[in-house]
Amino acid sequence: MIGKAIATALVGVLLCAPAAFGFGAGAGGGVGIGAPMETLMPSPPGDVRASAGKDMATVSFKPPKTDGGSPVTAYTVTAYPGPIMVRSVRSPIVVKGLMSGVNYRFTVVASNVIGTGLASAPSNVVTPQ
């Protein structure tokens, strides 16, 4: 009788464990106990601004509010329309090879050793000459 009671209690604990202890797969694809992967990556960079030049744009931004616990190792600017991506370690970033007379917006992501965070809000629209 005691064995059955212990087995029943153990099953109850195991059934409640995922909610109580955070077991399982998260959106970041990891399995186990701990912080979701998204909290270990940098938050989006802020205040993204672009200025146009001849077939290029200069994109400036502020660092992310949080780095996820690991220093930011790179920033990547993406041009829309694209697909032009430029990677650097600091702001501002010069994006070359843009078409004259085309309207562009830019987003920026920050990366650390864990991964790449979410994209920033889009920049202002610029039109290279």
Image (tube, rainbow, N blue to C red):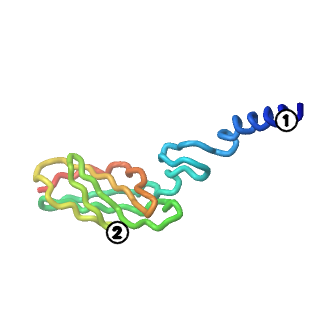
Marks 1, 2: nearer the viewer = 1
Q: Is residue 108 left or right of residue 13?
A: left
- At x 11%, y 52%, the residue is 99
Q: Is residue 47 above or below residue 3?
A: below
- Can you identify the residue that label 1 sits on? 3
- Labels 1 & 2 near each other (Cβ < 8 A): no
State the image coordinates of residue 62 (x, y, percent, origin top left).
Answer: 40, 62
- At x 39%, y 59%, the residue is 110
Q: Amino acid at mark 2?
A: Arg
Residue 39 or 64: which is nearer the viewer?
39
For the residue labelled by badge 1, is the local secondary structure a helix, a strand or a loop?
helix
Q: Amino acid at mark 1?
A: Gly
Give the position of the C terminus as an image quadrant. bottom left
Q: Residue furthest right?
A: 1
State the image coordinates of residue 35 (x, y, percent, origin top left).
Answer: 58, 52
Quadrant of residue 18 in the image? top right
- At x 69%, y 40%, the residue is 17
Quadrant of residue 96 in the image? bottom left
